[in-house]
Image: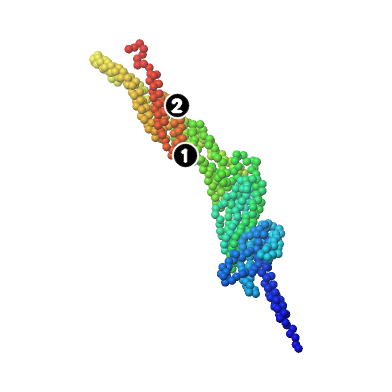
């Protein structure tokens, strides 16, 4: 009798063992989580590529198969790396396979990590569902990789300065160059910063190509003007770059680099500098314009003097205000200074322009003082002075007419002509002397009588005609003055002088200030100041003008003066005569 060795119970046991053998690997694989860095040692400016792989069972059926969304899949807790690494970019891929009729999803996450510090950094154990990865140690080395331009280097930064040391507030040109290969998809290059430095960008960035060790790189160049505000040592923070580029094969590469400028000594203001304002520059110039070439002006005439200070290697805010002193007898109305800064690839060039309206109010010689700007020549390392020499103006009175005696009049007053007829008559024969003498005596008497009449009439005319003529001239001058005052004309101060000299003969007024001082009229003084401010002060040229107050002040002054003059006139006849 032959016994069966395989019983139904044995078959059930073997089937159970087979199913367990098939199920356990699938279950174990669905809970795996691996972490793989592309390297365990890198420089602080480099990027670490971290690959994380995991798997999970996916419950799918015909109802939700087409609703499957990758974003709904769980992710590992990658935020655990953020204390030591910055997550720059991430992407994920997945695949699905069937194990024992069960859908299993295999997911791969790729992270670009930038180290935040140097030393030994740890990527901690990551968790994905029930799976836990093993921690990984990464060594981050200070500095940049040697031979940055080696064929294996995709990008690097170069920094250079035009000087090894500078004075405080002196211009330092910083050049930043970014070298990279491939087509740059995105990129961010940081700007230089410092709390105690003024930094100005010099124009737009330049782009070109350059070869290094036989490798062609695309280059982005930026230039900056840097002005350290404190003496000591200048150390700028590192310039950083982050970007993505696609190489010739179409692969996407993440770029990250940094570079620091060497330390620059900053010297203090030299002890031998004698100026009031420290001006370290490569060139400073003073220019003047607006004064008449002859340097001759008339009282009340408006001049606009323009002084321009130009400096190479300084911003406009560093230029000092220009002196505005003027001599007595010259009124000044300065405008707001205009500052400009021009940027070129070679640095900054700035200017300060000061325009001043000058109005002479007194005749004579007036000297505008010299203007001196002391500055420090950084190229020659010595003090220099920019100067506008003093200028002397000759101010003339426009109302004074040059009167010189006529030579003909002088000759006519030299003396009477000799009497030719008398000389001739003395030579006449004796027989005719009596008759000629009688006729001559009669003629002489008639001439003498006519002379008396003419003398009396001329004396009367001399007493009446000048007064009448002066009155007519004074009336005409006053009419012109009132019209100019009401219209706010610039010639009004001159007409005030012209009228006053006719109104008060013999005084010899030279300026409107003389007229105001003579009459001691505060209202007239205030109105003339208001007119001059409108004419010459900046920002008031387009102001509306009401000339009635000035006209009323002049009319009141004229009436008051005429009343006083009439009261002081002597009587028509002396006492005792009627």
Q: Quadrant of the N terminus?
A: bottom right
Question: Do we see residue 444 in this rendering?
Answer: no
Q: Is residue 575 left or right of residue 23?
A: left
Count every numbered label the image shows and give the total: 2
| 261 relative position to 328: left or right | right
Q: Report the residue at 57% width, 63% height from top.
A: 183
Residue tagged 2: 521
Give percent across and percent down for residue 519. 44, 25
- Residue behind mark 1: 539
Residue 122 in sight: yes
Alpha-carbon neighbours of circle 1 within 10 Å: few (<14), some, or many (≥20)? few
Label 1 and label 2: CA atoms lie apart by 28 Å
For image coordinates 69% across by 61% down, the residue present is: 123
Mark 2, secondary structure of its residue: loop
Percent x, y for residue 257? 63, 59
Q: Secondary structure at mark 1?
A: loop
Residue 573 in which image quadrant: top left
164 or 493: which is nearer to us? 493
Residue at the image point whose x is 64% and y is 57% from the top? 258
């Amino acid at each position: 009798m032959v016994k069966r060795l395989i019983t139904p119970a044995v078959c059930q046991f073997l089937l159970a063992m087979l199913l367990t053998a098939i199920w356990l690997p699938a279950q174990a694989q669905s809970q795996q989580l691996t972490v793989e860095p592309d390297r365990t040692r890198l420089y602080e400016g480099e990027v670490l590529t971290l690959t994380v792989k995991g798997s999970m069972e996916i419950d799918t059926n015909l109802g939700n198969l087409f609703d499957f969304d990758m974003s709904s899949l769980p992710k590992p807790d990658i935020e655990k790396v953020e204390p030591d690494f910055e997550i720059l970019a991430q992407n994920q891929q997945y695949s699905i396979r069937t194990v024992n009729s069960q859908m299993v999803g295999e997911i791969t996450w790729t992270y670009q990590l930038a180290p935040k510090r140097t030393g030994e950094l740890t990527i901690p154990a990551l968790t994905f569902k029930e799976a836990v990865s093993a921690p990984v140690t990464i060594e981050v080395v200070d500095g940049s990789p040697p031979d940055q331009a080696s064929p294996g280097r995709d990008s690097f930064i170069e920094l250079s300065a035009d000087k090894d040391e500078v004075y405080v507030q002196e211009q330092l040109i910083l050049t930043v160059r970014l070298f990279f290969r491939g087509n740059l998809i995105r990129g961010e290059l940081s700007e230089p910063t410092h709390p105690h430095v003024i930094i100005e960008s010099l124009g737009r960035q330049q782009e070109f190509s350059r070869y290094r060790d036989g490798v062609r790189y695309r280059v982005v160049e930026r230039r900056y003007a840097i002005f350290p505000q404190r003496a000591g040592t200048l150390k700028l923070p590192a310039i950083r770059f982050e970007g993505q580029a696609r190489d010739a094969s179409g692969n996407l590469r993440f770029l990250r680099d940094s570079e620091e400028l060497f330390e620059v000594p900053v010297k203090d203001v030299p002890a031998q500098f004698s100026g009031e304002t420290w001006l370290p520059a490569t060139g400073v110039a003073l220019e003047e314009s607006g004064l008449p070439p002859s340097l001759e002006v008339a009282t009340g005439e408006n001049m606009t003097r323009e002084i321009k200070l130009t400096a190479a290697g300084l911003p406009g805010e560093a230029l000092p205000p220009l002196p505005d002193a003027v001599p007595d007898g010259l009124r000044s109305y300065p405008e707001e200074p205009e500052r400009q800064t021009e940027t070129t690839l070679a640095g900054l060039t700035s200017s300060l322009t000061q325009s001043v309206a000058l109005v002479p109010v007194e005749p004579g010689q007036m000297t505008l003082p010299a203007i001196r700007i002391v500055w420090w020549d950084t190229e020659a390392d010595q003090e220099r002075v920019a100067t506008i020499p003093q200028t002397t103006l000759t101010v003339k009175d426009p109302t004074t007419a040059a009167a010189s005696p006529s030579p003909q009049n002088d000759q006519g007053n030299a003396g009477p002509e000799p009497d030719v007829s008398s000389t001739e008559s003395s030579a006449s024969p004796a027989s005719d002397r009596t008759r000629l003498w009688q006729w001559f005596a009669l003629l002489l008497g008639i001439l003498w009588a006519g002379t008396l009449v003419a003398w009396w009439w001329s004396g009367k005319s001399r007493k009446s005609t000048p007064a009448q003529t002066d009155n007519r001239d004074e009336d005409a001058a006053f009419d012109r003055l009132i019209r100019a005052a009401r219209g706010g004309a610039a010639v009004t101060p001159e007409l005030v002088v012209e009228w006053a000299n006719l109104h008060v003969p013999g005084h010899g007024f030279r300026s409107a200030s003389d007229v105001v001082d003579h009459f001691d009229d505060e209202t007239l003084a205030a109105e003339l100041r208001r007119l001059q401010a409108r004419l010459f002060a900046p920002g008031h040229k387009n102001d509306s003008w009401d000339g009635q107050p000035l006209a009323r002040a002049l009319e009141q002054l004229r009436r008051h003066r005429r009343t006083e003059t009439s009261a002081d006139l002597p009587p028509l006849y002396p006492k005792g005569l009627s």
